[in-house]
Amino acid sequence: MSVSADKIARHWDDEIVPRITEYIRVPAKSPHFDVEWERHGYIEQVVQLAHAWARRQSIRGLVLDVVRLPGRTPLLYFEVPGIGDRTALIYGHLDKQPEMVGWQEGFGPWIPRFEDGRLYGRGGADDGYAIFAALSAIAALQDAGVPHARLVGLIETCEESGSYDLPPYLDHLATRLGNVDFVVGLDSGCGDYERLWMTTSLRGLAAGTLEVRVLTEGVHSGDASGVVPSSFRIARKLLDRLEDPSTGWILPSAFHVPIPRERVEQAAHAASIMGDMVFRKYPFAGNTTPMADDGTEALLNRTWRPALSVTGADGLPAIENAGNVLRPYTSLKLSLRLPPTLDGASATHELKSLLEVEAPHGASVRFHADQAASGWNAAATTPWLGAAVEAASRLHYGKSAAAMGEGGTIPFMAMLGKRFPEAQFLITGVLGPKSNAHGPNEFLHVPYAKKLTACVADVLAAHAKV
């Protein structure tokens, strides 16, 4: 017996879309981007919004708590009793990335807008929908009389900052969580909106700020240039130690790992499904071309190979305010994505050493690390999970399931992988082509999310039969 996809769709229309619309309006930025998050109260507001909605759901035995530890962002915990001695954990988060520029006219990060089945606004897809979809799936199981195992849920509010608040909560809730043998994570992506996608790996992250200082204050560029070295040139030269400026290839071997054959084969299969959408999903400007013209290689680049992004800068005045001054310093925010099996802390230490040693012209160079996260590589999928995912995808989407790695980082998965090494993982999500999490015009593909909710319910039902 399967759940009613029609009832889930109505639940989304009647209850979930309106609540996510409210959620989008709240600028609940993650603490890394809002250091005064507690005083501002936005994170508390979205936690209370989700908590109030959850309390109204007709789920037998639902236990719902807002758990708080001193100095930590709050966490929403839920528990639903079930049959047998197995336990499945469902994961999501409510904190958001910052605004970002470039939203279309009439759209904005805190302006929910529903068009053509897409709900635009920050956080809806990444991944404020998770708590709503999870409880909707559980309610659908109970409504259909389909047994499920004991279920627990963790909805955190620090994920976009690297989940540094989560380990203390895992320790605090260890007894209540019990021995988890199945994890459902709803914070990932999909290659298209036509099937259920499993995420089989996630990259790690080494992030921080590179600061190059050459003067104690700015001076006239006509007087100083040619004598005082440019902080920008020095920063550029330091980055050349890490990255080939012509190709973007990360040079030190310490940041690379062998790619497992199974993941290469999965990337090839995913590329055959996605076709030119591997590239077309990105809003290339002008005649910009991708770094690889082969779909498989492009997917491997974004899932198993390291890559550098400069995501911010200080010390550079806006162009309209840029006088003829040789600036005293340049600071660049660096985001180095790491292969899934590379240790994040060790890689961050390696990056710091690489950038700081033997600074050109003896300049003052410091790399201030602020995020170090290890990636995650799934264990071999057991037959029951593979069969359940395939059956759910065919039933609700009408097409076979698919799997691939994702380029983002979900620190919680590596934490859970270490804590419950025997657990199976279904990591999935709604971040498909052009959904643009973290960027402008982020949207939640509601028709896809409805079917994903039904798939999650069916997989939870299969888990109970193992």
Image (cartoon, rainbow, N blue to C red):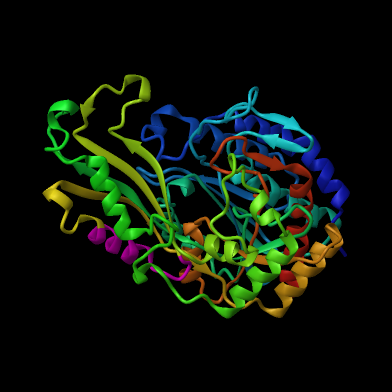
Depth check, front residue: 60 or 279: 279
Would you place residue 427 above or below residue 34 in this image? below
Would you place residue 446 above or below residue 458 in this image? above
Residue 25: x and y in percent read 59, 28
Region rendered in magenta: 339-354
Image-quadrant location for residue 221 = top left
Is 407 left, or right, of 235 in this rendering?
right
Q: Main secondary structure of the magenta part?
A: helix
Residue under the point 27% across and 53% down: 238
> Which quadrant: the C terminus?
bottom right
Image-quadrant location for residue 398 = bottom right
Q: Is residue 94 shown in magenta? A: no
> Which quadrant: the N terminus?
bottom right
Residue 124: x and y in percent read 63, 40
Depth check, front residue: 78 or 117: 117
Is 206 left, or right, of 85 in this rendering?
left
Residue under the point 33% across and 59% down: 242
